[in-house]
Amino acid sequence: MATDPWHYPRTEFRDRVLRTLLRGGADAITIYGPRRTGKTQFLLRDVAPEAAKSGISVVYASFWQASEPPVTILAHALRTTLAEPGLWTRTRDAWRQMKPKLRVAPMGIGGEIDLSGGAEVGASSAQLDLDDLIGNLPATQEKPALLLLDEIQELASEGHRGFVAGLRTSLDKRRPLIKAIFTGSNMDGLRAMFAEREAPFLAYGIQETLPPLGIEFVEHMLGAQEAATGSRADTAEAMSFLEEVDRSPYAFRRALETMSLRPGTGLREAHRLLLDEYSERQGYNRVWAELTVLHRLILVRLAEGSDGLTGRAALEDMAAELREPVSKGRISSALATLSRRNLVHKVFGKWSIQDPEFARYLRHVERTEEGSAP
Ligand SMILES: Nc1ncnc2c1ncn2[C@@H]1O[C@H](COP(=O)(O)OP(=O)(O)OP(=O)(O)O)[C@@H](O)[C@H]1O
Ligand SMILES: [Mg+2]
């Protein structure tokens, strides 16, 4: 992948993740990060090149709002990797280095790998093909293959159970030769995959949160801005702007881009311009227009970071705005509706807006409406 001067390398986190997988004994890591915090960039621009540099075969697949079945998506990703030039040499070398016990295992002679894995009984032929493809990846203990599976919460629904169970078996029986990094931006979905008693991915691997960006990110980005445009925003102002946008690399970068297109525009002004354009494109205005008043009150509260929705004061405030009583039960059912619409989710026990960009939009609307009130 071409190097992008605007990309800030998350070197420390990358090394920590790779070290944990390659030397720390973990077979999988799940990284949680809200929408647009840089999960995909991290996988593709930080992890993948570094792993590939040391001769590891890397497979990347994203399940975000996919129209194809997950088995097709992953099989395609595997075939892409398997078709890479030079892979056959690596496969051969990998087999040569393999310990005998791993090699005899597939024949069932008491190796460490149990190939009789239950999920294959009744597995679809597509799933069996997928298992073969995974088995074709060159992998040794020293150089395991690496699967990067982006937005796996999309697999949490009932309809994907068979796929997830099959994948789990495919990975399990090849431990420790296949390592995996999963990412997710929806806590409810991730929890459904990892924490439910019956969930097939239960206890598979360890969980991490994508570390928030700070001053090093700002300095890197301002350096790129200076190289590209010859001028540079003020560091302290840029850092406070980054905090204002909840440390979103997306919002920060787009604001810098807008500044370069419209010289003389400040960071905050650029952000306001973007927010208008973006909410139009994402249909936020339409979502907002269709919400009930109670839903709006709840969303704005969450966007402003107040966590108590069912405390007495909160209920009274909302009742005053609605001019009718508001019960805890009503709040819970409103939250359930908003959660089904993927507008809110629970993160570490607290309700929050799923899409941080939408949260910023809500704060913007709230301020504008307050401002325009008589
Ligand atoms: N390390 C980085 N350096 C510079 N810009 C970044 C970095 N990470 C992310 N960005 C910016 O943020 C945008 C969103 O990043 P990315 O798509 O990786 O986020 P994500 O968490 O995968 O989001 P989504 O939830 O939409 O899949 C990128 O298009 C890029 O503009
Ligand atoms: Mg992504």
Image (tube, grey):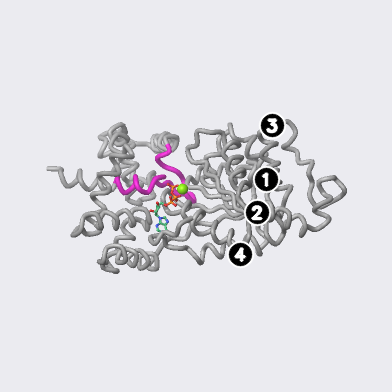
Q: Which residues are magenta?
A: 342-362
Q: Is residue 132 above or below residue 269?
A: above
Question: Residue placed farthest to the left in the image?
Answer: 374
Q: Look at the image and say whether residue 197 sits in the magenta stretch.
A: no
Name the spot of residue 366 as percent of width and height, x first: 25, 45
Q: Please rate how many residues cluster around mark 4, counting C-alpha atoms within 10 Å: few if below 14, some from 14 to 19, many from 20.
A: few
| In contact (CB < 8 Å): disc 2 and disc 1 | yes
Q: Secondary structure at mark 3?
A: helix
Spatial CA distance of label 2 from label 1 is 9 Å
Q: Quadrant of the C terminus?
A: top left
Find residue 134 and name its label. Answer: 1
* Rendered residue at 82%/49% (across/down): 105
Question: According to the image, label 2 marks what residue?
Answer: 145
Spatial CA distance of label 1 from label 4 is 22 Å
Query: Which of the marked residues, 3 or 1, is nearer the chain's N terminus?
Result: 3
* Rendered residue at 41%/47% (across/down): 352
| In contact (CB < 8 Å): disc 1 and disc 4 | no
Question: According to the image, label 3 marks what residue?
Answer: 125
